Amino acid sequence: MNEGPLRSLAVLAGVALICAVLVSVSAVSLRPYQERNELLQRYRHVVALTGLVEPGADDETVLEVVSQLDARVVDLKTGAFAADLDPESIDSRSAAADPGRSTAIPAAKDLARLGRRANHEVVFLVWDDGKLSRVILPISGQGMWSTLYGFIALENDLNTIAATRFYEQGETAGLGDQIEDPRWQAQWRGRRLFDDAGAVQFRVASGRVDPSSRAAGFEVDGLTGATVTGTGVTNLIRFWFGPLGYGPLLARIAEQPPVR
């Protein structure tokens, strides 16, 4: 009388065992593809700013450039590279919330409205025939509704903007989210950050940039209907290229150019 239930339990146990084995095999076999996709997702924005690939490059090309990236950890207080820290170990977002790994920003100097910033950031050096070609730096700051995250690439004069990309934001659809529009981001190319005295002059204009104005070399067009977001972008640039951001790093690179 127990044969029927016992057989059913045995069949269920067998099916469960087979399913568990199949799931385990699938997880193991798919892991390399998952890791590959995670790597692509992590670095695609950086690779796009290197100048080494064409827009829309295939995954294999992107991965090839990723293998050439010179990622370094910078101590933001001193501007020195922290050779003892692995770039893969740095998570600046979580660090910013940890008093032991971050620095409180005085309210009067907190242009980006971050509250705290991580003590270390990962930056990327781009080389061309052994010479420094570009420096790619992460940037962030408060917009109207959200924290804006992006990267900016500087030419080797450490002043001229080579490219920029904002990749994460929660601004108003159709207005503030224009910061992700490639056409707007393209305006940044060739603009300068600093004037001859070393002061940060870059800004998002309140409207169209007047090409004949003295400020044109430091400005990009304003964001229609998104003045607060545009002001947030201006402020985060002025913060990150000041003394509490990448100012010490750029000064150190200018004085002691890094080597590959």
Image (cartoon, helix red, strand yellow):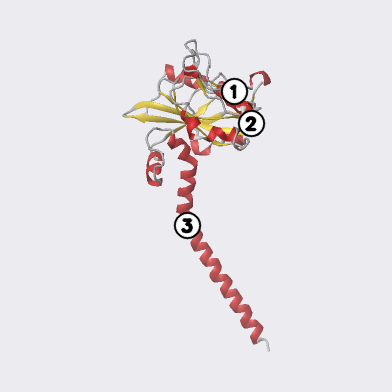
Look at the image and tell me whether residue 164 can be seen.
Answer: no
Task: List the residue tagged with mark 1.
Answer: 235
Picture quadrant where residue 67 is located:
top left
- Judged by depth in the image, the label closer to the viewer, 3 or 1, is 1
Most extreme residue toward the top is 197
Q: Position of residue 180 (x, y in %)?
A: 53, 35
Screen quadrant of the C terminus:
top left
Label 2 secondary element: loop
Kind of residue at badge 1: Asn
Reading the image, the residue beneath label 2 is 100
Q: Amino acid at mark 3?
A: Leu
Q: Which mark is residue 123?
A: none
Q: How far is the residue under mark 3 from the one under mark 2? A: 37 Å
Asked whether residue 128 is in view, the answer is yes
Quadrant of image for the N terminus: bottom right
| N-terminal-most mark, 1 or 2 | 2
Q: Pointer 1: residues within 10 angstroms few (<14), some, or many (20+)?
A: many
Work out whether 38 lies above or below 176: below
Q: Residue at x 64, y 85 (%)?
A: 4
**Label 2 neighbourhood size at 10 Å, few (<14), some (14-19), many (20+)?**
few
Give amino acid for label 2: Gly
Q: Secondary structure at mark 1?
A: helix
| Residue name at image x 56 percent, y 70 percent | 17
Instruction: Provide residue 44's location: percent of width, then percent of height.
Output: 46, 40
The residue that mark 3 highlights is 30
Residue 95 is left or right of residue 246, and the answer is right
Lower sequence index among marks 3 and 2: 3
Q: CA distance from mark 3 to mark 1?
A: 43 Å
CB-based contact (under 8 Å), mark 3 and mark 2:
no
